[in-house]
Image: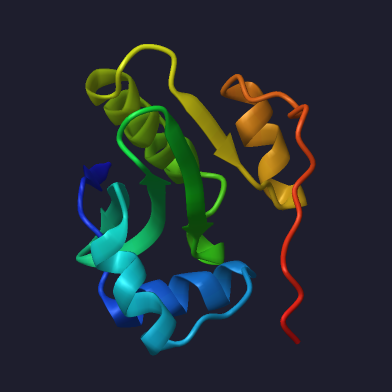
């Protein structure tokens, strides 16, 4: 398995989100995400990016996992687990003691996150409705 600590391209990011069933984002939304994230991990198979994930954070204590996505034809092969492991390993290697690692889980990802030690938070996720 070829796991890299690099972002996808804008086109790959947009495609992965769309095809994995995440809320679609535009190229204009994707471009800043690629350069402003704390960390990225991607899985490459035969020259194609088939899975991705990133960390948004301040590098001190707060780290939020986002954009965990795997193309449907490549799911259930351990790529999501490999992405998550790579990102968590980087956090634990580079962050000061006791980082707070959070995520918002779509229902299909809950078994993976639970298996990797995530538990329900004492906080309630909310979003600003701009529509």
Above/below status of 53 relative to 18: above
Q: Residue at x 50, y 52 (%)?
A: 66
Q: Residue at x 57, y 67 (%)?
A: 20
Above/below status of 85 relative to 14: above
**Residue with the most extreme top position:** 97
Horizontally, residue 25 falls left or right of residue 61, namely right
* Residue 78 % position (x, y): 47, 39
Instruction: Classify residue 52 by image quadrant.
Output: bottom left
* Residue 121 % position (x, y): 74, 29
Q: Residue at x 29, y 47 (%)?
A: 38
* Residue 102 % position (x, y): 57, 36
Q: Residue at x 28, y 57 (%)?
A: 45
Which one is in front, 5 or 93?
93
Above/below status of 43 relative to 12: above
Instruction: Classify residue 124 by image quadrant.
Output: top right
Horizontally, residue 124 falls left or right of residue 55, namely right
* Count of numbered marks: 0
Which one is in front, 104 or 97?
97
Horizontally, residue 62 falls left or right of residue 76, namely left
Q: Quadrant of the C terminus?
A: bottom right
Instruction: Classify residue 59 by image quadrant.
Output: top left
* Residue 21 % position (x, y): 64, 70
Horizontally, residue 60 falls left or right of residue 25, namely left
Above/below status of 13 relative to 131: above
């Amino acid at each position: 398995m070829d796991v890299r600590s690099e972002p996808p391209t804008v086109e790959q990011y947009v495609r992965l989100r769309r095809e994995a069933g995440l809320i679609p984002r535009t190229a204009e939304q994707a471009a800043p995400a690629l350069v402003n994230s704390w960390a990225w991990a991607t899985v490459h198979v035969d020259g194609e990016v088939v899975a991705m994930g990133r960390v948004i954070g301040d590098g001190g204590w707060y780290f939020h996992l986002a954009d965990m996505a795997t193309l449907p034809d490549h799911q259930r092969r351990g790529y999501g687990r490999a992405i998550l492991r790579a990102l968590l390993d980087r956090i634990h290697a580079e962050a000061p003691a006791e980082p707070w690692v959070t995520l918002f889980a779509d229902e299909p990802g809950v078994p993976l996150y639970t298996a990797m030690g995530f538990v329900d938070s004492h906080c309630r996720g909310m979003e600003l409705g701009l529509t």
